Amino acid sequence: MTEPFGTRLRRAMDERGPLCVGIDPHASLLAEWGLDDDVAGLERFSRTVVEAVAGRVAVLKPQSAFFERFGSRGVAVLEKSVEEARAAGALVVMDAKRGDIGSTMAAYAESFLHRDAPLFSDALTVSPYLGYGSLKPAVDMAREHGAGLFVLALTSNPEGAEVQHAVRGDGRSVGATVLAHLAAENAGEEHLGSFGAVVGATLGDLSSYDLDVNGPLLAPGIGAQGATPADLPGVFGAAVRNVVPNVSRGVLRHGPDISALRASADRFAEEIRAAVAAV
């Protein structure tokens, strides 16, 4: 029987700390590293990040779009990066934000959540804004193959508020409704459920929301977007122990020097441990 993603994630967070490092090879970062904006530069960038931190952080999160822009050769680099990161012991969250209905959603799920797929990842980011029920094929595939989902709920981009904070007829916001669905998915899980939410670390006080979904909370915004590890308890309250803080540029800007990448990741990991332990 396949061990659920939530169980594996809880163990990785306890052993390595909860830090998630993004792999975001956009053109400006490639240039900062002295690399060309081509497949060779993409491969060098991605392999360096994996070599530097996959053996020491809980989660790596490649942003699929930055690989897809190079076509099939870029996707091949992504496949190899996922394989090498998982071989080094990191869990991989594929940041692809897929969202559709019916057979199309099922095909997305099969692409990333089926254990035999070339791009199989431990978890996938998805969008619920065609209705939470549209995610059912992904939920079912994740359960079958021991994978997980991170569902966009309260994102850090300013534009998200017009949808996520909108109030439904029953008086509950859209974001709160997504969180309630996730709590239902994770009901009865003893360690950590496999169905998490994306909640921005830059959003300030979220005490009006019930973030206790018995699952992980992927929290972008640490580092370049302005949030710090010390902000986490104030944003997430009692749910902070289930937070997976994501840092991308804050670590990646120290490349291509492997020692500098590791030192930066270690520094963020220690600051996050200290902030969580203080709660």
Image (tube, helix red, strand yellow):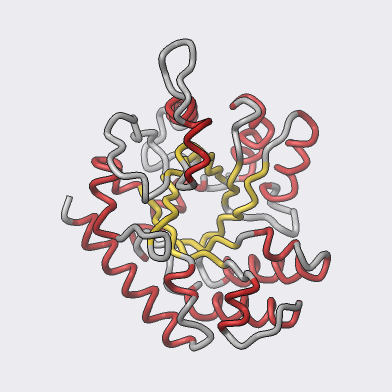
Residue 2 or residue 122, whichever sits in front: 122
Q: Could you tell whether 159 is left or right of 80 in the image? A: left
In the picture shown, does residue 163 fall above or below 11? above
Residue farthest to the left, as pictured: 278
In the rendered picture of this protein, how many numbered marks are placed on residues? 0
Residue drawn at (62%, 24%) of the image = 133
Please state, as top left, top right, bottom left or bottom right, where the N terminus lies in the image.
top right
Residue 110 placed where, x, y %? Answer: 74, 44
Residue drawn at (52%, 41%) of the image = 159
Q: Could you tell whether 119 is left or right of 248 in the image? A: right
Say which quarter of the image contains residue 80: bottom right
Q: Could you tell whether 150 is left or right of 223 in the image? A: right
Say which quarter of the image contains residue 144: top right
Residue 122 placed where, x, y %? Answer: 58, 53
Residue farthest to the right, as pictured: 72
In the picture shown, does residue 63 fall above or below 53? above
Residue drawn at (68%, 59%) of the image = 65
Residue drawn at (75%, 61%) of the image = 68
Residue 243 placed where, x, y %? Answer: 36, 49
Residue 81 placed where, x, y %? Answer: 65, 70
